[in-house]
Amino acid sequence: MFETSNAIQYSEIWESESQSFESHSVYKRLAQDIPLERVLEVGCGIGNGTKHLAEGRAVLALDNNEHLIAKASARLKEAGQSAQIHHCDLFELNDEDLKVIADFQPKVVVAWFIGSHGDDINAHTVGEPNVFEKAKLYREHIEDIVVSPKVSVDSVEIINLVSRGGLATSASDAQIFESQKADYDEHVFGPVGFEVYDVKVSRWDRTGSTFLYGQAHNPNFAGGETTQVITSIFARRKTS
């Protein structure tokens, strides 16, 4: 279904899922962990996360879906919150886009629940035939852009990536931290001078959710009983 969706369809699909997150206070909890600093949000969605981030913070949100941007703008207005939302394509950031980001001087970059519509995902995962792997590959491409100097400019001190998925119930907090740190430091943060310093895991209540998530193969999963969780990974810029 989602592999063939377009921007309009996805904005409606994601609105329902985002409202499910909001009903379980997911965005509120995530925002509480973010310092009261200037925040660059990658993907405003329908504005639920933006709304909570804007409480006590200056926020610049980036999104490439004009239909989501319209929903986010309306939601912020309804909540009496303000944030700057900039329409751009992360895969093709132009000089104006880069100037908007640099001029904002963010201290924190957040990228929560990265995803997009099928047309967009297909365009940026050419050569990958598996639908579930496409979504995972797209997220990895976006993460690479998020941590790059184009987005995480010199002023950025902290990056926060949030995703949802399954986790072995037998894993301890220490095991979760060490495995996530090793993986993200090697493949995401380390090459650009950041390192993981905290990993927060919370139960993912799927009540009310109708969103169809693909399950890509995870070579690091040892098997056993799983539970659905939201994982929030924090990385800090290394000091020389």
Image (cartoon, rainbow, N blue to C red):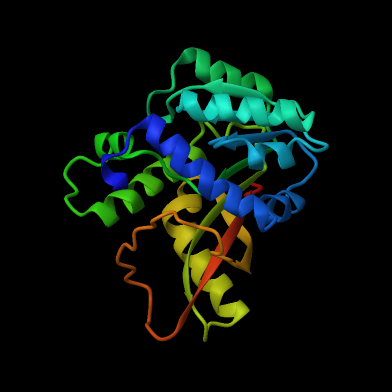
Q: Is residue 94 above or below residue 142?
A: above
Horizontal side, residue 120 vs residue 71: left or right = left
Residue at 50% in and 60% down:
164
Q: Going by the picture, which residue comes out furthest to the top? A: 96
Q: Give the percent coordinates (x, y) of residue 120.
A: 32, 34
Residue 65 seen anywhere in this rendered image of the structure: yes
Q: Give the percent coordinates (x, y) of residue 156.
A: 65, 37
Residue at 78% in and 35% down:
57
Q: Quadrant of residue 100?
A: top right
Q: Is residue 100 above or below residue 55?
A: above
* Number of numbered discs visible in the structure rendering: 0
Horizontal side, residue 157 vs residue 192: left or right = right
* Nearer to the camera, 85 or 191: 85
Residue at 38% in and 24% down:
92
Q: Quadrant of residue 126?
A: top left
* Nearer to the camera, 88 or 92: 88
Residue at 66% in and 58% down:
24
Q: Is residue 189 above or below residue 227?
A: above
Horizontal side, residue 220 vs residue 130: left or right = right
Q: Is residue 22 above or below residue 105?
A: below
Residue 193 seen anywhere in this rendered image of the structure: no
Q: Give the percent coordinates (x, y) of residue 197.
A: 64, 60
Q: Give the percent coordinates (x, y) of residue 175.
A: 55, 79
Horizontal side, residue 137 vs residue 205: left or right = left
